Image (tube, rainbow, N blue to C red):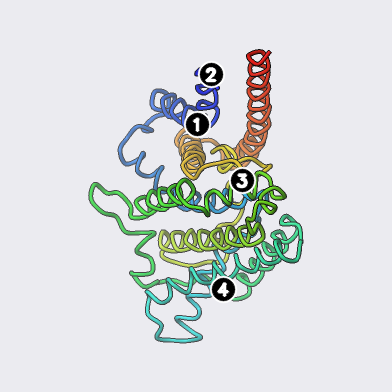
Amino acid sequence: MSKKMRIQFFILNNLIWAILIMYFAVNAVFTPHFLNYDNVVNIFYHTAILSMLVLSQGLILLTGNLDLSIESTLAFAPAVAMLMATQWFPGLGPYTTILITLGIGALVGLFNGSVVSYLGVHSFIHSLSMLIILRGLTLFLVPFAIFKLDPIYSFLGSERIMANIPVAVVLMIVVFLLMNFIMSNTPFGRYLLATGGNPDASYISGINTKRIVCYAFICSGILAALAGLLAAGRQDAINNTMGKDMVLLSFAGAILGGCSLNGGRGTPLGMLGGALLLGMIDNSLTLIGVNVFLMYACYGVIIFLAVLLDRLKAKWRDHLFHQESLRKLENTG
């Protein structure tokens, strides 16, 4: 591959960071108070919850599937765990409650993955049903908010450390770096990309594609439950509307970050870039006083642009591969 083409592929694979830097620079100049330290910290803080859902959705997109239920898992997992600790099994410690929260997310993911992988139900249809089921159960179980959470349970979402940096931001960076390492340096990461890129070839080569898809859904459920922990800690309460309407933004963030709707393409760091861009957009629109209903419309525009960008990047990538094939034919001829 020529040096020019390698540069083009590098730009294509890291386009989100160029967009992010340009958007930040424009707002730093034209948006009042955008560049203030506290505001920059708040962008990261308010992005932390969405970023967990973006990563959760991104892992599923890598396999060529999708998961609409993650926003309901975000509310369902901490709601059930807190009810267990306060009503059903009084006396459970906060650390145990945290583990139960993540465990519930893992169980939801295991169920989703099993139905999609082993029963062959389309991920869109199944996850849509789970979105409704889990939200309905949450509404039934928690008709009113649960207040005054244990400080240890709300620690991840509310506590701040030196320089007023929220623990949630540190956790977000650690999770993304860890997942990026797993995707880049472990067989699971390679198998996940291979499964999404070409499931038939992966299966023939010896990869248990059904198990890999199931593992991806389990990871997705855990990340959604972790997002629930952050949301509960941030408001020091658990209510039945947590995470509502965030699933579509998780798609937008993952696709903006380089994931493909066709599967097999994307990186956790790219997904982080997509989540941060969404956080910056939300923050800048708030600072300039955009009407809340217009902001909701803007989210729809962002989703449309994300899908359009995915199509354009796919066409650009196909063009580059075509040019490379022509170059090789010319050299051999």
Rounded to the nearest angstrom, the CA distance separating label 2 from label 3 is 33 Å
Residue behind mark 2: 2
* In this rendering, position of residue 169 left or right of residue 244: left
In terms of depth relative to the viewer, which is nearer, 252 or 82? 252
Residue positioned 38% across, 75% down in the render? 94
Q: Earlier in the sequence, mark 3 or mark 4?
A: 4
Residue 12 x %, y %: 55, 28
Residue at 40% x, 48% y is: 177
Q: Earlier in the sequence, mark 3 or mark 1?
A: 1
**What residue sits 58% from the left and 71% below the top?**
107
**How far apart, in angstroms, are the residues tagged by discs 3 and 1?**
18 Å
- Indicate the amino acid at tag 2: Ser
> Between tags 2 and 4, which lies in front?
2
To which residue does mark 3 refer? 251
In this rendering, position of residue 21 left or right of residue 321: left
Q: Which residue is mark 1?
A: 14
Write down the residue under mark 4.
Answer: 142
Q: Label 4's element? A: loop
Given the image, on which type of amino acid does mark 4 rest? Val
**Nearest to the observer: residue 61 or residue 87:** 61
Whole-angstrom CA distance, mark 4 to mark 1, is 42 Å
